[in-house]
Image (cartoon, grey):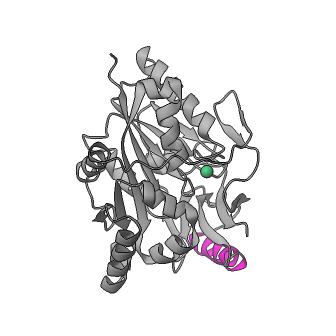
Amino acid sequence: MIEKIPIYLLTGFLGSGKTTLLKRWLQEPLLQHSALIVNEIGAVGLDHATLGYASDASALLADSCVCCTGLPGLHEALENLFWARLHRGVARFDSVVIETTGLADPAPLVTSLKTHRFVSERFCLAGIVTTLGAPTALAIMTEFAEARSQLDAAGVVVVTKTDLAADAQLDAVSQALRRSNPATHILLSTQGSLSADEVWHAARSAIDSSQRSPKDRSWRVVKARVTAAGLVRRAIAPHNADTRFETIVDEVSADSLRNSLAGMIARHRTRLLRMKGIVQLADGTSVVVQFTRGDEKVQISPAPETMQTALTGMPSGVTLILRSR
Ligand SMILES: [Zn+2]
């Protein structure tokens, strides 16, 4: 019997810090030989560039969401990785990490990992970790079914940005998590402080020791078109969100950019869930832009050296993820 390749599934609501943690984990022994599949709801992916992952065993599923429109693209990516590994077309990998979009419900994905013939015979789920940003946790759990599904599915919930929340707030978040899912293993993280071993071993035990895997649910079947490049184009908007890309060129400095972005945030204030992107300033330098609902202000930081290769050909601007109603 072939030994199945473990899949580590990382979910978490928009802006909850998945990429920050993953960036660290990919350098640790547990995950440093992993293949990486990054799924982004916007047409212009940023996370794969932020991760700056050197392995060629990686795939970006942009403009789709793996719980709905992107499922065929995910299966295809896993099949491609499997064959490339067998034929030594990519660096040898011993596991696969899937980072979902911030709006993905893991349940359909988990079901398909068990039922999709090719995939289920060759891959097995080794753990589900869900991140939850402490400052906005309670509001997000109340408002978004997607966030609740992510928490229901989790073997481990990593509460992130704990340095930005008061102790009383952290207690309230823990209590809310315990109420909704008493068996959840909760870990607290500040600035990506938890090790891959600590988190994923706990997630693996949750899978091994319980039948708490996400209940199978029916989900909306949406038409998706798989292009030759393996990207899945969205046929109808899933979830309750729209994404749009705003091109930004000719900003002369980080300060002028900050002003224009503040204006953009103000215009969309009630609907804006997330803004991120790479902007090229007039002097040729690139900056990373990040904003999540609940943040006091937009973060603008120089694009690190590790991102440079991934930035080639990437358009200058930001992706906005907005509530649609
Ligand atoms: Zn989805």
Residues shaded magenta = 253-267
In-image side of 313 versus 14 (left or right): right
**Spot occupied by residue 52 in the image (x, y as percentages of width and height):** 44, 45
Does the magenta stretch mainly form a helix, a strand or a loop?
A: helix
183 to 306, vertically: above or below: below
Which residue of the protein is positioned furthest toward the top in this rendering? 87
The N terminus appears in which quarter of the rendering?
top left
Image spot of residue 43 (x, y percent): 67, 48
- Name the residue at 64% across, 60% down: 318
Check residue 254 for magenta coloring: yes
Front residue of this view, candidates 214 and 309: 214
Residue at position x 62%, y 34% in the image: 72
Say which of 197 and 42 sits in front: 197
> Which residue is rendered at x = 38% and y = 72% of the image?
179
Find out whether residue 227 is within the magenta segment.
no
Residue 272's x, y, as percent? 65, 71
Q: Nearer the viewer, residue 215 or 153?
A: 215
Horizontal relation, residue 12 to residue 239: left or right: left
> On screen, 275 above or below 91?
below
- Quadrant where the C terminus sits is bottom right
Q: Is residue 196 visible?
A: yes
Residue positioned 62% across, 61% down in the render:
281
Q: Position of residue 201 (x, y in %)?
A: 25, 47
Q: Is residue 135 left or right of residue 126?
A: right
